[in-house]
Image (cartoon, rainbow, N blue to C red):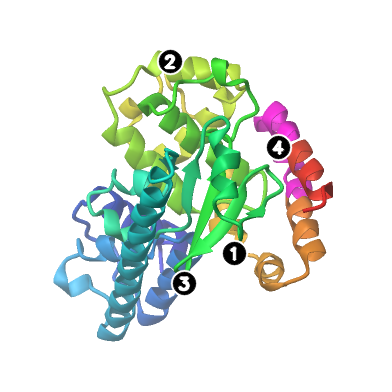
Amino acid sequence: MPHSYWNLFLELLRAGLWEQDLSLDVTPKDTCWERLLEMSRVQAVTGLLLRGITHLPKDQLPPAAIRMKLLAEADEIERKNLQAGLVEREVLAFFEQRDLHPIVQKGSQAAKYYAEPLVRESGDVDLYFPGASFEQAVAQVPQARRTPDGGAVSTYKGVTVEFHPRYYDLHLPAEKLPPVPSVTGELLLYSAHILKHAIGAGVGLKQLCDMARALARTEGLYDKAELEAALRKAGLLRWHRLLCSMLVADLGLDEQYCLPDFKPCNPRPLRRIVRLSGNFGVAKASRRKSVRCENIIVKKGATALSFLQRIPFSIRIAPGEAFATFRELTRGNLKKR
């Protein structure tokens, strides 16, 4: 068919992301719909693909069998979202009762920017504990295990809960970063978090959709000069320009939501990572194998290899932050837990 699978996938994704009606030049065949569904799973945007399909004219809708699969997966996404929301509320209440006041990161905070929050696939519940409250919080959860980046992780009612001693995925003193919580800080967090995964195991379109929706919905609610200054201090202006270039080119973000004087660049390097890696690298068989493996040495080796393979990209885009991240993970993995 004239469209590549990827371009067709992006058309449907944009329709779902921005809730816009869509008419395709060519109606996909059954095998194409199966391929699109698999791509949405790899990129963790099946809910958005379904939303995009609902904006098609009736004569271009997928066959009933595909629609049933999509509806079943959408129901499962909603169920997991509701469970994650329940866990988040109960965990927050648990810590509030102990006079600990974490700040929720990503997850539900990113979902709130969507027209239909429940279509965004939930992941972990991420909590930031400022200052000494981090160690106090970890002490309240004996089963929590430490992670190489200095955080901790536990599971509650089938949902992974992560504890973070830092709000940002950045290696800068707190006084050089925007206050927490703030809209500027949240946008900086999303940008830096996508970078962290892009230079590591990989990143999928879910995180990029989060960034696009957040930029569009917070327009006029924060100082763009403040965000630009923070990105400059962190050495991430080049990275953020690349990220926004892909958001504009592939996800249909209006340039007005980018930084002032935004000049798009070729997003090919980031696009390649997204297409080949998928959400947290699940598109790669080696990544899926390492995730399933119970041998901790194999897991750590796979993580290190991912960072090494991204060195050419990291050096060009964000060398300082990439080096600091790799150094931190190396030190963390060498420690006895």
Q: Verify whether residue 323 appears in magenta.
A: yes
Classify mark 2: helix, strand or loop.
helix
What is the three-letter code of the residue carrying label 3?
Answer: Glu
- Split into 4 quadrants, where in the image is the N terminus? bottom left
x then y, percent, for residue 10: 39, 55
Magenta part mainly helix, strand or loop? Answer: helix
What is the three-letter code of the residue carrying label 2?
Answer: Glu
x then y, percent, for residue 237: 55, 23
* Disc 1: CA contacts within 10 A as few (<14), some (14-19) or many (>=20): many
Classify mark 3: helix, strand or loop.
helix
> First in sequence: mark 3 or mark 1?
3
* Disc 2: CA contacts within 10 A as few (<14), some (14-19) or many (>=20): some
**Residue 266 visible (yes or no):** no
The reply to whether callout 3 and callout 1 are in contact (CB within 8 Å) is no
Q: Residue at x 58, y 26 (%)?
A: 236
Q: Is residue 38 left or right of residue 280?
A: left
x then y, percent, for residue 217: 27, 35
The residue under label 1 is: 282
> First in sequence: mark 2 or mark 4?
2
Q: Is residue 176 left or right of residue 295?
A: left
- Hey, which quadrant is residue 135 in on the image? top right
The residue under label 4 is: 325
The residue under label 3 is: 38
The vertical placement of 34 against 188, above or below, is below
Nearest the viewer among 202 and 268 is 202
Q: Residue at the bottom extreme?
A: 65
The residue under label 2 is: 226
